[in-house]
Amino acid sequence: MSTDPVLVLQMHRMGDLILTMPLLGFLLRHWAGHEVWVAAEPDFFQDLMPLAPNVVFFPPAHCHALEQRHYELALNLSSRPQALTCQAKLKARHKLGPEAIEAGTLPSHQHINGYWQLYRAALTHNNRNNAFHWADLYMLDLSPQADLTGVFRPSPRPAGTGRIGMVLGASELAKRPDADFWARLARRLAAEGMLPLFLGGPAEQSLGQEVAQKSGLPGANLCGRLSLKELAALMRTLDLCVTPDTGPMHLADFVGVPVLNLSMGPVHARETGPSAPGQHVLRAAMSCVGCWQCYRGKLYCKQAFTASGVARLILSLLRTPDHPAVPSGLRLYSTGRDALGLYTLEHVGLGTDISCRPLLEDLWQAVFLFLYNPAQRALLISRLERLRAAFPPMAESVAAGLAGLCASFSRHLKQGARILPDDFWRSQPPVIRLFSGYLHMRMQNDDYSPKAWRMALDNLEEISALFMNHS
């Protein structure tokens, strides 16, 4: 029996590495006879090693040596050329994720192995209506039934200290509140007897100083003073971590700290929100939330957040959690897991979430689950019927979009155009663009072979038939 190690290439940011932790735990349990190796940036993995004590970490500089080995499984989660080359050169019984290839008939320089890895890649600038969490997509190719119910998730527990961690920074300015917001929020919490702590890395040192000065709480500023290991230890002493969508949020979530995610800017909470059940996500009550990039003149989703409203919500979550005080113009969600162990966001508070967006996301989630595992047909039908009952015009728009996609494919084939133009997926209506983007990338990935065309047409026919048969 093979004892070759399992290799994961994850060379992106800290948040991406922390989102990989559930996958590493999954590998350690289900590939028990194999060591789990990870290639990642030392600045991130060195302080995270205590969170994964049975995992062997290597810096990217060791890729040349790693690619000389044979592995039971090699999973590349990185788009960096170094990772693509390593994945191509190494030998493995099973390979998942992108690898470098020599250009064939197309100007493409990588091939993606794995249904869900290809789906994940197709989300680039095309994630609208995606309902799969990033951490789940890392694991789904390892489950023939797309069932993640056995994955361990920590239960968030307040420490009972009155400490409120406030993660100030994020990778983009659009994804976080400004200094004035944080200062006003801290003052209001301190006035209610809470103990705010300003958290962040070296990049947030100046921001931390500004917030501390404006709030009049100089002793609360810990930005740039803690290693990741020390930050994780401190987080375990918090009653709540208030944070934008960023790496430290995932760290708090992973170590079992209650999280309130202020989800603003070009982020989609169903993709990258706190993944453990029982966490909270706050975002604007707007249909455009969850974009990849905002093209509007102002970030209206960010302007919907006020320090006074968020402060009232925080106090209610701590004191009367069954009756949260949700600010006007915002919606509060609780994270959970469905019957397949997949990530969910459930609306919390008075009223209902009247947007069709969650139902449309659920529908497309069921479509891709069905294409991966036909046993999920009943789930797809039930979600189609639910969308049709609640929003008939939206269901009709999806059906019309699928019919138009059929016509587009037909025109290209009649014209002898085996290779689709690069913007083909984008030319389809937004309501089906997640599907057209996936089909387009899959054909590209298979060099537009006759088999690739047949699979795309078969998938389109299957989904279109379901809409016709259940109209």
Image: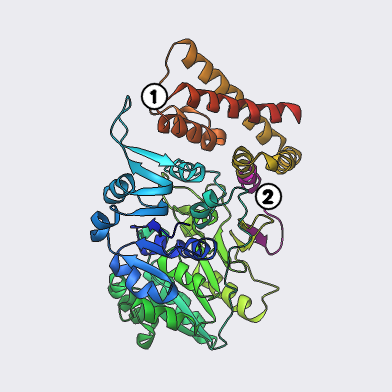
Gap between marks 2 and 1 measured at Cα: 37 Å
**Which badge, 2 or 1, is on the more N-terminal residue?**
2
Q: Which residue is label 2 attached to?
A: 354
Q: How many marks?
A: 2
From this view, report whether residue 391 is shown above or below residue 232. above
Q: Amino acid at mark 1?
A: Pro
Location of residue 53 by image quarter: bottom left
Give how far across and how far down residue 2 sits, in percent.
45, 57
Q: Which residue is label 1 attached to?
A: 421
**Element assignment for label 1:** loop
Report crowding for label 2: few under 14, some 14 to 19, many 20 or more residues within 10 A (C-alpha).
Answer: few
Give how far across and how far down residue 271 sits, in percent.
51, 54
Q: Of residues 390 and 453, which is closer to you in this image?
A: 453
Q: Amino acid at mark 2?
A: Ile
Residue at 47% x, 21% y is 450
Q: Which of the colour schemes (rainbow, by chain, secondary structure, one colour) is used?
A: rainbow
> Which disc number belongs to residue 345?
none
Residue 84 colored in magenta in the image: no
Q: Of residues 332 and 110, which is closer to you in this image?
A: 110
Q: Write down the region rendered in magenta.
A: 345-363
Q: Of residues 217 and 374, which is closer to you in this image?
A: 374
